Image: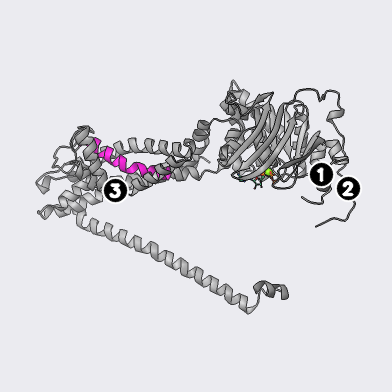
């Protein structure tokens, strides 16, 4: 379907970062991906993608379904290692260190680079255990009360606390889809990672929960480097300072969110943002 | 053809043609239910027949003395205590060996081994092993445990070892299927918060796979408990009048005892045979009951 309406570009809502004084482009990026190509068997899913992710800003990944956003995100914490047919070429650095080097401990890498998956995947354990699991296996808390505090804080930040505080011992899989996704967010931030990768965290959420997650992203910005995949242009415009547009496995355009949404360099970006295809 | 018609006319959901199609569907559904019921009925009838004849023939032979005495040449003083104890000791040895080794193999093959020609070959071999007739395992036990390792003849230790060889492949196959059935998203979730491979397996995969593993184990154990042929091969057919006091003492087991008694010329042993069958069935029932109880307990953990 084509819309004949004049392209209404998503409102350039208050643009935070780059105008703020503490943001400096000169700082070294938290993560740097260089010429990343990913193959599933013989099929190439990503072609020479290079992106930098900074810890004082949010980077949004947008693009039509199947263009490789999740695939790229999963490269950043080596989640693609778990897919036997997947092969990743290129260099990815975390704080200047090659994450694919033999010296890199993949277990620690995944603790430092946390992930919220596209499909909610809570453990079939209690709500409490879901959130407590990460801190427990890494030995982040010294006592039970400290662990309780971490669980409560994480659930509050994910906007789930009020709904579950009286039933922390119930199974996490008994929650609704949106609640499960917030539980997964709480689980990811409970280990206090340095980078958080969120793959469409709000796709199953109502507007209120979505607003809560966006608030959380604002709150976490500056402490963590955040990368978020979203199909919602308004959301990308609201939460991010950098946007990357993917199309058919290629990184078409990457730049300041404000520029992307008001004045994209590429025709394909313009078409996607204004809803001509996707 | 159909699509053209549906484009031309609106589907008439309440029309006669639709009603008769609907009735036809219900008819085949009823037929299927009936067939299923008949299938279950046949196996139930056989079970009832077996239990009925055994109880009728053997109930008279069941007595406290029958349960506390051991084998004897005189039917009046022959009992199953020795064989029962032997069966129990044998199955304990089998369980202690086959369960941990089988589960560990399943975990290793599913979670840690690389997928290549070697693991494919191992998979085929294990599947074949599960189908090997039990008498072959008896010959293997005879050759390895008795003739080569010189373990005591007729002992529950050797019987248990032999039956463990036979049960292991069954547990490996059931374990692998149960582990495969754990959704990959759970593994990803655990890896995503920085769990190591072993933590993923022991904290998440194994608890979810345990009910399936236990089901396979129950089947394997029940088969081992009723096994006769391989135990004959390793000498558990001797006449033993003293119950074993340990796993290295000469002993009999229930199925072999039944086999031996059924061969006796003395008519009085017919009753003994049926009574021993009842004891064996009750023993199996108790073991399966315990296993099912354990399985349900683990299943309730979410
Ligand atoms: N495990 C896999 N095996 C084979 N091909 C895969 C696998 N995962 C993804 N792909 C392919 O890689 C391409 C990119 O997939 P990806 O999941 O990264 O898309 P996406 O941009 O996240 O899409 P969406 O917005 O629908 O989530 C697709 O063509 C997909 O078919
Ligand atoms: Mg995706």
Structural distance between the alpha carbons of marks 3 and 2: 78 Å
Residue indicated by mark 1: A269
Of tags 3 and 1, the one toward the viewer is: 1
Outermost residue to the top: A142
Q: Is residue B227 visible?
A: no
Mark 3 burial class by Cα count in 10 Å: few <14, some 14-19, many 20+: few
The answer to whether tags 3 and 2 share a subunit is: no
Disc nearer the start of the sequence (2/1):
2
The answer to whether tags 3 and 1 share a subunit is: no
Give the structural element (helix, strand or loop) at label 1: helix
Mark 2 burial class by Cα count in 10 Å: few <14, some 14-19, many 20+: few
Q: Is residue B171 left or right of residue B9?
A: left
Mark 1 burial class by Cα count in 10 Å: few <14, some 14-19, many 20+: many
Q: How many marks on residues?
A: 3
Q: Is mark 2 within 8 Å of ligand 1?
A: no
Using the rendered view, name the quadrant where residue A10 is placed. top right
Residues rendered magenta in the picture: B155-175
Residue indicated by mark 3: B282
Residue B161 in the magenta stretch? The answer is: yes
Which residue is at 55% across, 40% downward?
Answer: A84
Using the rendered view, name the quadrant where residue A118 is placed. top right
The N terminus of chain B appears in which quarter of the rendering? bottom right
Relative height, residue B274 to residue B197 (above, below): below
Structural distance between the alpha carbons of marks 3 and 1: 74 Å
Relative height, residue B121 to residue B47 (above, below): above
Using the rendered view, name the quadrant where residue B191 is placed. top right
The chain letter for the residue carrying disc 2 is: A
């Amino acid at each position: 379907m084509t819309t004949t309406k004049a392209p209404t570009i998503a409102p350039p809502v208050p643009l935070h970062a780059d105008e703020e004084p503490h943001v400096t482009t000169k700082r070294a990026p938290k993560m740097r991906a260089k010429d990343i190509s990913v193959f599933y068997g013989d099929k190439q899913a990503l072609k020479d993608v290079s992106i930098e992710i900074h810890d004082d800003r949010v980077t949004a990944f947008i693009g039509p379904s199947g263009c490789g956003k999740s695939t790229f995100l999963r490269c950043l914490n080596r989640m693609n290692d778990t897919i036997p047919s997947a092969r990743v070429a290129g260099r990815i650095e975390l704080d200047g260190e090659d994450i694919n080097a033999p010296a890199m401990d993949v277990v620690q890498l995944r603790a430092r680079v946390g992930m919220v998956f596209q499909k909610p995947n809570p453990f079939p354990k209690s709500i409490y255990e879901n959130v407590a699991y990460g801190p427990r296996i890494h030995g982040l808390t010294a006592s039970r009360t400290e662990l309780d505090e971490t669980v409560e804080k994480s659930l509050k930040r994910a906007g789930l606390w009020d709904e579950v505080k009286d039933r922390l011992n119930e199974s996490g899989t008994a929650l609704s889809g949106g609640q499960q996704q917030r539980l997964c967010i709480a689980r990811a931030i409970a280990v206090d990672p340095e980078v958080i990768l969120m793959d469409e965290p709000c796709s199953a959420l109502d507007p209120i929960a979505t607003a809560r997650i966006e608030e959380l992203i604002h709150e976490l910005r500056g402490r963590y480097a955040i990368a978020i995949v979203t199909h919602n242009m308004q959301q990308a415009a609201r939460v991010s300072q950098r946007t990357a547009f993917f199309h058919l496995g290629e990184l078409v355009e990457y730049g300041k969110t404000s520029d992307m949404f008001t004045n994209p360099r590429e025709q394909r970006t313009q078409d996607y943002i204004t809803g001509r295809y996707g | 053809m159909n699509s053209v018609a549906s484009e031309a006319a609106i589907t008439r959901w309440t029309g006669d043609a639709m009603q008769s199609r609907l009735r036809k569907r219900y008819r085949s559904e009823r037929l299927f239910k009936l067939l299923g019921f008949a299938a279950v009925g046949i196996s139930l009838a056989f079970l009832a027949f077996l239990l009925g004849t055994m109880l009728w023939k053997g109930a008279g032979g069941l007595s406290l003395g029958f349960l506390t005495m051991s084998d004897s040449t005189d039917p009046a003083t022959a009992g199953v205590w020795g064989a029962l104890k032997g069966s129990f000791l044998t199955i304990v040895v089998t369980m202690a060996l086959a369960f941990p080794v089988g589960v560990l193999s399943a975990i290793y093959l599913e979670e840690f081994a690389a997928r290549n020609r070697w693991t494919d070959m191992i998979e085929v071999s294990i599947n074949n092993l599960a189908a090997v007739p039990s008498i072959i395992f008896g010959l293997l036990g005879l050759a390895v445990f008795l003739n080569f390792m010189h373990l005591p003849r007729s002992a529950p230790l050797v019987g248990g070892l032999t039956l463990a060889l036979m049960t292991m492949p069954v547990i490996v196959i059931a374990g692998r299927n149960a582990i495969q059935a754990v959704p990959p998203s759970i593994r990803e979730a655990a890896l995503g918060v920085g769990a190591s491979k072993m933590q993923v397996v022991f904290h998440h995969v194994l608890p979810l796979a345990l009910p399936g593993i236990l089901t396979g184990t129950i089947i394997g154990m029940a088969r081992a408990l009723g096994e006769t042929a391989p135990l004959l091969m390793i000498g558990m057919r001797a006449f033993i009048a003293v119950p074993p006091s340990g796993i290295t003492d000469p002993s009999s087991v229930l199925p072999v005892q039944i086999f031996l008694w059924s061969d006796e010329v003395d008519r009085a042993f017919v009753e003994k045979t049926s009574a021993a069958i009842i004891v064996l069935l009750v023993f199996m029932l108790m073991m399966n009951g315990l296993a099912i109880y354990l399985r349900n307990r683990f299943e309730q953990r979410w």
